[in-house]
């Protein structure tokens, strides 16, 4: 197999029809250039140049080989440039998955910062529940995900980096009957439709603690009543109905400050996220994925 360096020397000799001038262009000695061409001739089993004391000229096959060599060298140069760009985060794409709650957190700042630092990249973000996100990462459709870790457990397929816990805040619209109560119980919440993303097991258990065994087994209390993975829509549902919901504080801060939504003082142990960054254990992360993970971890440390 011909080496790229020998092909470059071949092109230089072909262009100059002179071993000495080719040596000057490549920065090699004339004997080194001669040996390089001899290696190619031995590899191909053909003479590439007709040599005399006064002239060096390409053989007919040499012209065909040089044409192909130029294409090979150009392809190698493009490949090398692409690798340098990816390594330097000047190009490339990254597809990530984010759970509904974390999509309303500092994750957005991390993604925006990555794009700002590296304008030549493309980031595709998918927001969905854990079951769908896990299917996507296993199939290779997404490279990393940031979501609830409750269902990861000891799954050896994943490498997990936990993130600091954040508290979920229960809320309703400002006209809601619960908005006037000084304390709200879990029973109170269950008197109204619950509009939330798909609930992880720990959230369902939080409600099951106050349900009777018959209620738990019969499924007469749907958890939640309305399931939606988009918090913009969930907030609209709550604003336009007597539904109650839960979100991270940052998600509802503008609506609470404007008086449209009211937080509920729930008389129970707080529900907190058990979120983290998940990657496949048998897959080497891309430079872009590593850069985003570093930004997420740094921002999480600042936020908490």
Image: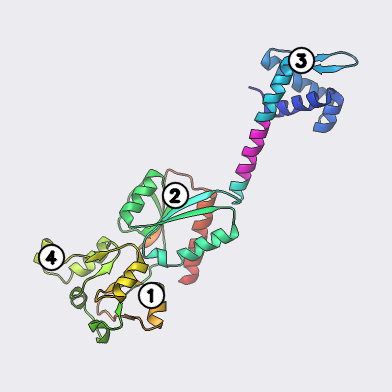
SS type, badge 1: helix
Q: In this view, does 95 lie to the left or right of 247?
A: right
Callout 4 touching callout 3 (CB < 8 Å):
no
Q: Give the CA distance from mark 2 to mark 4.
A: 38 Å
Span shown in magenta: 73-84
SS type, badge 2: loop
SS type, badge 4: loop
Mark 4 or mark 3: whose residue is earlier in sequence: 3
Colour pattern: rainbow
Residue 207, percent from left and from top: 21, 69
Within the magenta stretch, is there residue 172?
no
* Main SS class of the magenta portion in the image: helix
Mark 1 or mark 3: whose residue is earlier in sequence: 3
Residue 287, percent from left and from top: 54, 50
Pick the front one: 260 or 25: 260
Q: Which mark is residue 252?
A: 1
Task: Tell me the residue that label 3 is attached to.
Answer: 59
Q: In this view, does 86 lie to the left or right of 189?
A: right
């Amino acid at each position: 197999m011909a080496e790229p360096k020998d092909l470059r020397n071949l092109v230089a000799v072909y262009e100059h029809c002179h071993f000495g001038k080719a040596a000057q262009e490549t920065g090699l000695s004339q004997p080194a250039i001669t040996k390089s061409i001899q290696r190619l001739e031995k590899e191909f089993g053909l003479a590439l140049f007709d040599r005399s004391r006064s002239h060096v000229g390409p053989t007919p096959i040499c012209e065909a080989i040089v044409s192909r060599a130029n294409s090979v060298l150009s392809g190698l140069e493009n490949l090398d440039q692409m690798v340098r760009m990816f390594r330097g985060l000047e190009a490339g794409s990254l597809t990530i998955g984010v759970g509904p709650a974390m999509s309303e957190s500092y994750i957005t700042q991390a993604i925006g910062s990555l794009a700002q630092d590296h304008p030549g990249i493309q980031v595709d973000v998918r927001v969905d529940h854990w079951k769908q996100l896990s299917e996507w990462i296993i199939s290779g459709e997404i490279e990393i995900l940031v979501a609830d870790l409750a269902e990861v457990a000891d799954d050896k397929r994943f490498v997990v980096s936990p993130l600091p816990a954040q508290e979920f805040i229960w809320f309703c619209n400002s006209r809601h009957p619960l908005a006037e109560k000084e304390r709200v119980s879990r029973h109170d919440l269950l008197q109204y439709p619950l509009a939330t993303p798909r609930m992880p097991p720990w959230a369902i258990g939080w409600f099951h603690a106050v349900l009777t065994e018959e209620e738990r087994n019969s499924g007469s209390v749907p958890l939640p009543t309305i399931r939606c993975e988009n918090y913009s829509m969930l907030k609209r549902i709550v604003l336009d109905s007597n539904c109650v919901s839960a979100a991270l504080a940052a998600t509802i801060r503008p609506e609470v400050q404007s008086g449209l939504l009211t937080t509920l003082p729930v008389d129970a142990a707080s529900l907190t996220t058990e979120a983290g960054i998940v990657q496949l254990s048998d897959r080497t992360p891309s430079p872009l994925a590593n850069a985003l993970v570093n930004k997420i971890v740094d921002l999480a440390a600042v936020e908490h």
